[in-house]
Image (cartoon, grey):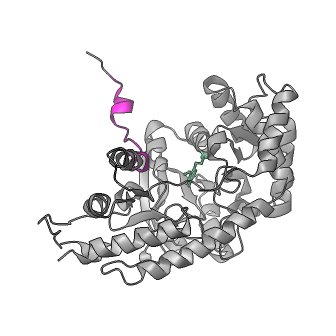
Amino acid sequence: PLVLSDRINSMQESQTIAMAKKARALAAEGFDVINLSFGEPDFQTPQYIKDAAKEALDQGYTLYTPVPGYLELRQAICDKLQRENNLSYKPENVVVSTGAKQALVNVVMSLVNPGDEVIVFAPYWVSYEEMVKLAEGVPVPLVGSLENDFKVTAAELEAAITPRTRLIMYSSPCNPTGSVFSREELGAIAEVVARNPHVHVLADEIYEYINFVGEHVSIAQFDEIKDRVITVNGFSKGYAMTGWRVGYLVARKEIASACEKIQSQITSGTCSIAQRASLAALQGGRSSADEMVTAYHRRRDLVLELAKDIPGFRTPTPSGAFYVFPDVSGCFGKSTPEGQTISSAADLAMYLLNDAHVAAVDGGAFGAPACIRFSTAAADDKLREAFQRIKNSVSKLA
Ligand code: PLP
């Protein structure tokens, strides 16, 4: 018989990917399914970036690259960090990876020993917990309250830190809530970290450009903790480049070198052509991202308006990213016309898929079992249609 490792047996399949699979299966049966389960831009990669990839092929960028990425790309990342984030780093501090996802795993694997605690701000992105478990660490979800826009406060963090805490992880703008930490909030968190020299911070800034409130703050800007901050970013969201698989981390040299070492044994770095395309993306600045953000902003407002009078939904206003994350606990305890009781967000997500043919993701996957995540990265008319159907379906609950 096939016997798999305990490691893989204890790992959950990504629920966002599982939901997308179910939606595809229903669509294959001929149903008109609107899929709002995906965390993916519905835009194409800008043409100038595609052109750079074609050129890279013709110029012969087809062999192994340096493990941490082409020097020119790492330099361009340093220039970006200086220009946009007021952070000074050298190429030796940067490791380019196979998506931000691999950058995050590199860091967790480099810092976490078995039994170490990793405080994961919740609601969190689905993969954080599984990454920590892979490193045999102990994920400690720390839940931000709906009243505080789902954001963990410095006082809550301080109370959660123990002598075993090795790392804290969060995303801002946040997937799934769209919350954005302010300078003040991150400054208070940085003070807590400064008082706890055994704690490192993994800041996931992949949604940096998709921000409707304006100021993006990197916690690495707080000098007293800069040595213990690892910043992760990438090209997937801001440049609509999910399929190219390019992300990066920036950290003090010892940590960057450790991540390079892991990467040298596991992937040898990411695709040469995609790296050249990413260099062009950075050289083009952020104007293509700004156009997409205008659309995401409009759609957020549209969806908030549509969700406003769905009975049982409480939908906070996201400040960034491309999701809405309503608390749907007002629907719990009600019954579907078929007589099935809705007792969780997972039940409601399944009901919406089957009844409204709208795919969304149960908040339990993000450490928020009262919520459901809907992606707003879909065309305006699709969003209108989806939320009309959701409203009809939810109105049938009694
Ligand atoms: N971090 C967060 C918070 C995300 O939502 C995602 C993608 O959904 C990633 C990282 C992964 O990005 P990439 O596609 O660059 O690996």
Out of 246 and 301, give the one closest to the viewer: 301
Determine the residue located farthest toward the bottom in the rendered image.
309
Horizontally, residue 89 falls left or right of residue 226, namely right
Using the image as rendered, state which of residue 103 and residue 20 is in the foreground: 20
Single out the residue that lies furthest toward the front: 30
Q: Is residue 242 magenta?
A: no
Instruction: Please tell me which residue is depicted at 49% across the width and 75% down the height of the picture.
Output: 303
Q: Position of residue 330 (x, y in %)?
A: 28, 77
Query: Does residue 27 lie above or below 261 as drawn?
Result: below
Residue 335: x percent and y percent? 16, 70
**Quarter the N terminus occupies:** top left
Q: Position of residue 174 (x, y in %)?
A: 55, 63
Residue furthest out toward the top: 1
Left or right: 178, with 90 as reference point: left
Q: Residue at point 45% right, 51% down?
A: 126
From the viewer's perspective, is 35 left or right of 294? left
Let me know if residue 91 appears in the view.
no
Give, as a single range, the part of the protein colored magenta: 4-18
In the rendered structure, the answer to whether residue 33 lies left or right of residue 299 reads left
Total residue callouts:
0
User: Residue at left 74%, top 66%?
Assistant: 290
Q: Nearer the viewer, residue 53 or 223?
A: 53
Residue nearest the observer in this picture, 391 or 76? 391
Residue at (75, 46) in percent of width and height:
252
Q: Is residue 6 magenta?
A: yes
Residue 46 x, y percent position in the rendering: 75, 52
Position above or below: 63 against 213: above
Q: Examine the image and state in which quarter residue 192 appears.
A: bottom right
Q: Quadrant of the C terminus?
A: bottom left
From where the camera sits, is residue 282 visible?
Answer: yes
Q: Is residue 175 above or below residue 310?
A: above
